[in-house]
Image: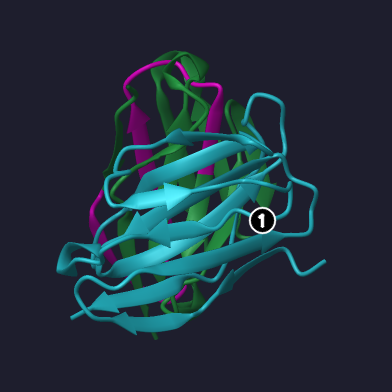
Amino acid sequence: GIQVEQSPPDLILQEGANSTLRCNFSDSVNNLQWFHQNPWGQLINLFYIPSGTKQNGRLSATTVATERYSLLYISSSQTTDSGVYFCAAQRWEYGNKLVFGAGTILRVKS
Amino acid sequence: NAGVTQTPKFRILKIGQSMTLQCTQDMNHNYMYWYRQDPGMGLKLIYYSVGAGITDKGEVPNGYNVSRSTTEDFPLRLELAAPSQTSVYFCASSYDREGTGELFFGEGSRLTVL
């Protein structure tokens, strides 16, 4: 099946800094999503982005499907951005299911 | 819309007991999923369903059973609970014929087996 790797595993930022999180996947994908898990454990869908670029406020994401990676950009980070960021990918030939990466733990300090 | 609702939020079981985690969604989604998340780890798929009456195994199905009698409900059954099933369980749903739609999660159910 498809393999999903995220980097870095851990990231500590000062409030106001920018960051880039990376997601590599082992095969071409039909579905690529980014999620944020807040410190209380809630999982929120940030982007559905199998290709191209999307922006939502201070967050944006780009997926380069031909090169098998996706990037999540966080600008002007805030303490509320802390948590774990997951990307998940799916390829139809491997079944109707998303495979999650191990996540990037982000800590934003005030 | 309430979205995806899971119950209970917390539960402690003794080894060998059984229980059912309930999941319901009111978004008329055809795809539903159960994931487990062990401490400090990512999510692993237990079972999923592409519609009422159809279920399939994910990565870690052993020790679990599911059913999908309606579009809204997708309960997860734990038979003969074991300490290895201590985890946080998430139910999720999406709408798309090929399952490529945006995924929405419930708030999770924290299960401890002692």
Q: Colour of chain B?
A: cyan
- Residue type at mark 1: give it: Asp
Side of A53 where B11 appears, left or right: left
Q: Position of residue A92 (x, y in %)?
A: 52, 18
User: Which image quadrant is residue A51 in?
Assistant: top right
Q: Nearer the viewer, residue B9 or B38?
A: B9
Side of A10 where A16 appears, left or right: right
Q: Dot 1, how many residues are within 10 Å of its Cα: few (below 14), some (14-19), or many (20+)? A: some
Q: Nearer the viewer, residue B58 or A27?
A: B58
Q: Colour of chain A?
A: green
Q: Where does label 1 land, which residue?
A: B73
Q: Nearer the viewer, residue B61 or A98?
A: B61
User: Which image quadrant is residue A53 in?
Assistant: top right
Q: Residue at x 30, y 29 (%)?
A: A3
Quadrant containing the N terminus of chain B is bottom right
Quadrant containing the C terminus of chain B is bottom left
Q: Residue at x 80, y 48 (%)?
A: B28
Instruction: Look at the image and give the residue range highlighted in magenta.
Output: A8-33
Q: Is residue A9 magenta?
A: yes
